[in-house]
Amino acid sequence: MPTLAHGPLPRAPQALRRPAERNRVVPLPGLGPQPCVGAYAVVVRGGRVAVGDRVEPA
């Protein structure tokens, strides 16, 4: 979480501001667009993920 300090790294609350400004979703009917920052994935095949595994965009 960049809004908190981690070891020698200082807080960086501005780190999520730009993505939150540009990424908006309407979570429920009747609500306006809300900021949404995250990673989304679809599990195609279960198993372990390891360093060096290939990642393909959807």
Image (cartoon, rainbow, N blue to C red):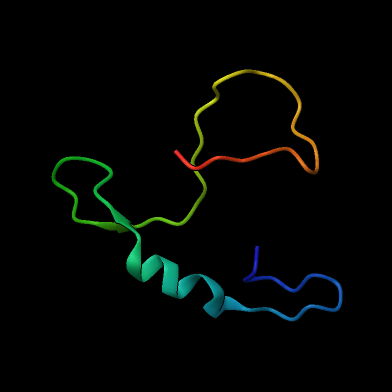
Q: Is residue 43 left or right of residue 22?
A: right
Residue 41 x/y as whole percent: 51, 36
User: Does residue 57 sit above or below 49 in this rendering?
Assistant: below
Residue lying at 24% horizontally and 48% vertically, measured from the top left? 26
Looking at the rendered image, the quarter that the C terminus falls into is top left
Residue lying furthest top = 46
Residue lying at 43% horizontally and 74% vertically, measured from the top left? 18
Residue lying furthest left = 30
Looking at the rendered image, the quarter that the N terminus falls into is bottom right
Residue 14 x/y as whole percent: 53, 79
Q: Is residue 1 left or right of residue 57?
A: right
Total marks drawn? 0
Residue lying at 35% horizontally and 60% vertically, measured from the top left? 23
The picture quadrant where one finds residue 36 is bottom left
Residue 35 vs residue 23, the one in the foreground: 23
Residue 4 vs residue 53, the one in the foreground: 53
Q: Is residue 8 left or right of residue 4?
A: right
Residue lying at 50% horizontally and 51% vertically, measured from the top left? 38
Residue 32 x/y as whole percent: 18, 55
User: Does residue 11 sit above or below 21 in this rendering?
Assistant: below
The picture quadrant where one finds residue 28 is top left
Residue lying furthest right = 7
Residue 51 vs residue 18, the one in the foreground: 51
